Image (cartoon, rainbow, N blue to C red):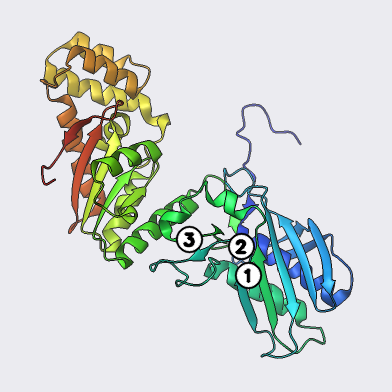
Amino acid sequence: MNASSSETPKLKSGFTTGAAAAAAVKGALRFLIKGSAPAAVTIRFLTGETTAISVHSCEKLDSDTARCTIIKDAGDDPDVTHKAEIGAVVRLLKDGAPGEILFTGGKGVGRVTKPGLEVPPGEPAINAGPRKMIQEAVLESIEDSDHTGSVAVEIFVPKGEELAKKTLNHRLGIIGGISILGTTGIVRPMSHAAYIATIESSLSVARAMGITEVVFSTGRRSERLAQTQWPHLPEETFVQIGDFFRASLRAAGRSGIEKVTLAVFFGKAVKMAQKIPHTHAATSELTLDNLSRWVERLAGDKPFADAVRAANTARHAFDIMMERDPKGDTGIIDQVGREMVGAGAEFAGPGIQVRGVIFGYNGEVLFDSTSDR
């Protein structure tokens, strides 16, 4: 039955790189044990749910070794690894404990080089969730077979090094490729869980390296400006939080970080100043209403405030404000900055210092809540 035009289409879930890796392992084992390449394999997610995953390619390399690949399907969730090929080379070993798995990372799978992550330095970046799914796939596959030894599993991603350039893996100390991730195996569209997990991992790496102060930006451009502003700070200090204002401050509060600097453009600062937890563009109308009230109170100029309220975007409002008040005499931007710092401190909780820096769209610093640098 077709949904009516007034209904919101249901977003399609997908599966993680970890689930794809587990499916590739199971496909290779099926080939070795059953003697024929499977068209699909059934994988059990860590939630207990199961799904059939199509096998992209499968070949036997010798009597004890097979290689299979899966095309990752992230569903309707935007994901840099959507449609990526994830593979496994599996070898049945005659020695070793039954069911023991020897993990290695092949081409395109990153290697951990910094402390603070779920996987210790020196190990392939295959997290605990995927390892558990792979282990279950191995045990299920060999349960009724004659194999009594261990199993060597090499996970690889043919274009992993290229894909890793679109991630922040290098910041986390993961080099040479992507991470094999997934806490459940399922990709829930728009859950944002992966992004928040990246923020938490960045904070964990920073703390493990003895860093107690971090700089939060909302994207690459604001981060570049922050790095130019404070070139003496190590790379791990800088964390991109996207739209996740409240979640990132709460994560910082839990992590043991002592100081957070919010280094953002004016548009994001206005939303943060109004305690908007997730600073997506969809909140812009309410944002401008509130900003215009501050303008009217501080500037005492209703036509000016009305022009700000009628602006198309926060940046448009900023341009109007700069034209009317280029020297900042009315203190509107300072008001936004102070409110942003207050909101950040509230979200972070006690015991953490919050500093605010607002950049203009030409890269100039418009507001800095402290003068300690």
Amino acid carrying mark 3 in the image: Ile
Q: Which mark is residue 174?
A: 3
Give the mark nearer the N terminus: 3 vs 1.
1
Give the mark nearer the N terminus: 2 vs 3.
2
- The image shows residue 349 at horizontal and vertical percentages of 22, 55
Evaluate if marks 2 and 1 touch, with contact meaning CB atoms under 8 Å apart: yes
Image point 27% across, 31% down: which residue? 270
The image quarter containing residue 114 is bottom left
In the picture as drawn, the residue positioned furthest to the top comes out as: 303
Give the mark nearer the N terminus: 2 vs 1.
2
Image point 67% across, 56% down: which residue? 158
Image position of 235 (left or right of 292): right
Q: Looking at the figure, which quarter contains the N terminus? A: top right
Amino acid carrying mark 2 in the image: Gly
Amino acid carrying mark 1 in the image: Met
Badge 3 marks a residue whose secondary structure is strand
Residue located beneath label 1 in the image = 133
Q: Is residue 171 above or below residue 45?
A: above
Q: Dot 1: few (<14), some (14–19), or many (≥20) neighbours within 10 Å?
A: many
Q: Can see residue 43?
A: no
Badge 1 marks a residue whose secondary structure is helix
- The image shows residue 283 at horizontal and vertical percentages of 38, 30
Image point 25% across, 12% down: which residue? 306
Q: Dot 3: few (<14), some (14–19), or many (≥20) neighbours within 10 Å?
A: many
The image quarter containing residue 109 is bottom right
Image position of 117 (left or right of 249): right
Residue located beneath label 2 in the image = 18
- The image shows residue 227 at horizontal and vertical percentages of 30, 44
Depth check, mark 3 against mark 1: the one in front is 3
